[in-house]
Image (cartoon, rainbow, N blue to C red):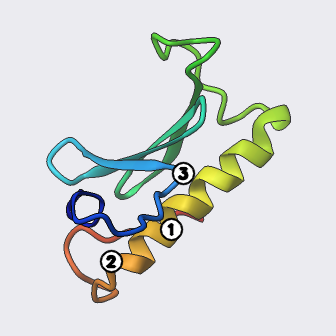
Amino acid sequence: LRPLLEGREVTWREFLVSEVRNDTGRMVRAGRFKLIAYRNDPTVQLFDLGEDPWETRNLAGEPRYASELAELKRLLNQWEADLDLAPNAKGRFVLE
């Protein structure tokens, strides 16, 4: 917020990332879709928060949501890369 308070122009990200469960996972949200991924677990969770705000239906395996899943994985991987952590640093993982 500092640049904004200082009157400078600010470029905002179009997504939000947070850590889940003591740094064992990550969550990324963009628009109405949310992706949750855990370290050392290939299973991911994808939710449409507009249709399912209580996150009861995992859409990750449904082909019609493949583009949303791929985009959220891309955003999370880019965010990880922007952190510039060492490849084996604690807290770093990459979704495939």
Q: Is residue 1 visible?
A: yes
Rendered residue at 52%/63% (across/down) = 95
Rendered residue at 54%/51% (across/down) = 14
Q: Is residue 24 left or right of residue 16?
A: left
Using the image, determine if residue 70 lies above or below residue 91: above
Which residue is labeled 3 in the image? Answer: 14
- Tell which circle, 2 or 1, labels the residue nearer the N-terminal end: 1
Using the image, determine if residue 8 lies above or below residue 47: below
User: In the rendered structure, which amino acid carries the disc numbered 1?
Assistant: Asn
**Answer yes or no: do the residues labelled 1 and 3 have beta carbons within 8 Å?**
no
Counting other residues with Cα less than 10 Å from the Cα at mark 3, is it few (<14), some (14-19), or many (20 or more)? few
Q: Is residue 55 left or right of residue 71?
A: left
Q: Is residue 94 visible?
A: no
Q: Which mark is residue 77?
A: 1
Which residue is labeled 2 in the image? Answer: 83
Which residue is the extreme one toward the left?
A: 22
CA–CA distance between discs 2 and 1? 10 Å
Percent position (x, y) of residue 1?
24, 56
Q: Quadrant of the C terminus?
A: bottom right
Q: Which of 65/39 is in front?
A: 65
Kind of element beneath mark 1:
helix
Q: Is residue 88 left or right of residue 70?
A: left
Rendered residue at 66%/28% (across/down) = 59
Q: Is residue 84 left or right of residue 45?
A: left
